[in-house]
Image (cartoon, helix red, strand yellow):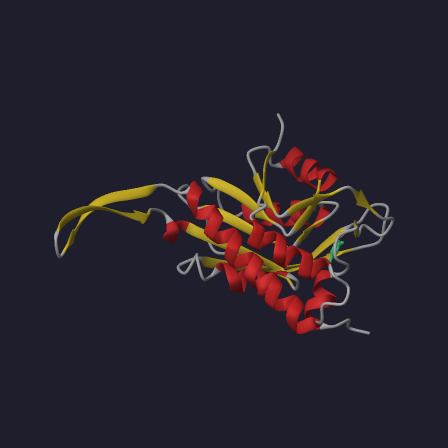
Amino acid sequence: MEPKVTVMDHPMVMEQLSLVRDKRTNQVAFRKAIYRLGRFMAYEFLRTLDVQEFTVETPLGPAKGGRVKGNDKIVIILVLRAAIPFVEGMYKNFPMARTGVISAWRGEPPDFPIEVNYAKVPQVGPDDVVVIADPMLATGHTLREVAKKVAEKGRPKRMVFFSVIATKQGIDYVSKSFPRAEFYTCAIDPDLNDHGYIVPGLGDAGDRSFGAPH
Ligand code: URA
């Protein structure tokens, strides 16, 4: 079964994506652009939720009204640290989201062992839509382990991965373990280098948002 992948290529997304790719973009501008991408992606994603229709009374008579159904069923999983500004943007359109936080450390190639050293995840119900947020879906090793941690908390109605840039290899790797998962991204890049970085990508998303630790 082919993974369900949606590439969000709205012109506003392209503009912010170009900013984060540009090596001249400084830390503050980079973080703001990631924040906007989170906001735009969440806005577009709301199209996939049901709308409850009702009648609204205008001063001149009845009109068709609508509200998003299930916005209170969204559970965001924030993967430290690069997803911090990404998720902050998502809250603009997922204001009622419950949030889990997971820290996962990816080891050296070629095996890229993953150490999950912090996980605070809310209970997940059968009506919930889980959105796992990590700007870079590179090898998929981290996200597969993150999704496993989330799966321990229950089986959601939908499991969705939000990334800014993904690779086909990463998507395939994750979807082998989670065939029902959906992938939303702004771009799919062609390569991974030997260190598991996406090429051309944007570099290290955490370092570019917060500064390199050394
Ligand atoms: N994490 C990043 O920040 N960048 C990549 O290219 C891959 C993983």
Q: Quadrant of residue 101?
A: bottom right
Query: What quarter of the picture does the C terminus occupy?
Result: bottom right
| Residue 120 visible to an observer of this rendering | no
Query: Which residue corresponds to the image point at 77% horizontal and 71% vertical from the top-left?
Result: 212
Q: Is residue 169 above or below residue 26?
A: above
Left or right: 80 with respect to 65? right
Q: Is residue 173 above or below residue 12?
A: above
Query: What quarter of the picture does the N terminus occupy?
Result: top right
Instruction: Locate residue 119, reporting x and y percent.
Output: 59, 59
Query: Which residue corresponds to the image point at 50% horizontal and 48% vertical from the top-left?
Result: 130
Q: In which of the image's four quarters is ligand 1 placed?
A: bottom right
Left or right: 44 with respect to 107? left
Instruction: Locate residue 198, reporting x and y percent.
Output: 77, 50
Of residues 159 and 28, which is closer to you in this image? 28
Query: Which residue corresponds to the image point at 46% horizontal and 52% vertical from the top-left?
Result: 43
Of residues 27 and 10, which is closer to you in this image? 10
Q: Is residue 16 above or below residue 155?
A: below
Query: Which residue corresponds to the image point at 71% horizontal and 71% vertical from the top-left?
Result: 26
Query: Which residue is outermost to the top?
Result: 1
Instruction: Locate residue 145, reporting x and y percent.
Output: 66, 48
| Residue 172 visible to an observer of this rendering | yes
- Count the numbered circles shown: 0
Q: Quadrant of residue 175?
A: top right
